[in-house]
Image (cartoon, helix red, strand yellow):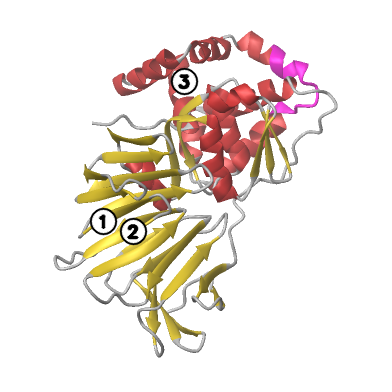
Amino acid sequence: MNPRIITLFDLSLIIARHLAGEMTDEEREQLNAWLAESAHHRELLERVRDERLTREKLLAYERADVEEALARFLAEKRKRSMRRRLTRYAGVAALPVIAAAWWLSSRPVAEAPAVDEPLLPRLASSITLTAPGGKYIELPAALPPEQRIGADLVLKQEAGMARIVPVTGDREEYRTISVPRGGEFRIMLGDGTKVWVNAETKFSFPLEFAGGERRVMLEGEAYFEVARDSGRAFAVETPLATVTVRGTSFNLSSDARRARTVATLVEGAVDFTVRETGEQVPMRAGEQVVLTGEGWDKREVEPSLYTSWREGWLNFSSERLEEMLEVIARWYNAEVLFVNEAAKDMLYTGQVRKYEDFREVLNIISLTRSARFSVDNRTIIVH
């Protein structure tokens, strides 16, 4: 059984229960595992235990109104239906405030404090559908039951997915859906295959598949639930590789800037083919292939870590901070600036809710790693 990823709130709750002497055996194992990860974690727990030191840190930061910050924190949590748990463990709520105060107290005096407005994801409003001739149509943000788009297409909603049906014209002609930073799109293809298209992604497909193969193109990231068809394989082409299946579920990420392609298989079997060499790598459920300029590597993984973005979560397991912030910034439509270059290689394991205030995400990281952050408009600065 794979260990459950601990969120900031879970961790705060466990520490509060630890201080109160009320931990369960499972919580004790989770806390011990977190403490074993690094000396920094153990030091952090010691700081939390020392209430006098905590109070001195808070008082030293003369601009911090702890009572007001705590009240805001409690009010926000009440909005998220967490009132009962927070009332029972009031000490839990103070931990993010403490972490923020430690960070703020170490900032240069000249630096302006963060604004009160939450930094939420900036959802994309311009997802487009483009034909080979260059003509594009802006797709509606909310899917209608049925709507005519352009002269020869109808957009329908089917089981929560968009389905584009040709009325006239070439049914085998490829169209391209472009999803910018901060966006998502779900589409059902002509054969019944379901595709979740992630932010900053281009996905090309025909309105209907003809011939002996079903073929699509991807630049970015998407999750596929491929409709079974024993007579026709389903192939996804990326700039560096091709993944071929007949009926299965998998996540595929293609990053042209970093020359990196990652395929994660949830169920079934696929063939991962390196386009430059023609080398074929068979994959089974629970395996991941990572292709870079240095070659390919196959390993066993927990697929949910790489597919949970469809359910509104971003999961990370021993991920470099630079790569993790790239993924998060793509969703929040933000930019990242590293003043502290050494922080790029810090490893992080955790879970982030995609619709949270970004500063809560930064609090999670600062609580578990020696990195400090400030936010200027939509630029995250890593100190």
The residue carrying mark 3 is 15
Classify the position of the C terminus by image quarter.
top right
Q: Is residue 185 left or right of residue 99?
A: left
Labels 2 and 3: the sequence-earlier one: 3
Q: Is residue 62 left or right of residue 28?
A: right
Residue 209 percent across, percent down from the top left: 29, 75
Labels 3 and 1: the sequence-earlier one: 3
The residue carrying mark 2 is 236
Residue 17 percent across, percent down from the top left: 43, 21
Quick check: can you spot residue 75? no
Judged from this view, the residue extending furthest toward the front is 277
Residue 343: in magenta span:
no
Magenta stretch in the rendered image = 56-66
Residue drawn at the location 44% of the way across and 63% of the way down:
203
Secondary structure category for the residue under label 3: helix
Residue 65: in magenta span:
yes
Residue drawn at the location 65% of the way across and 46% of the way down:
119
Q: Look at label 1 and name its amino acid.
A: Thr
The residue carrying mark 1 is 244
Dot in front, 2 or 3: 2
Q: Look at label 2 and name its amino acid.
A: Val
Q: Which mark is residue 46?
A: none
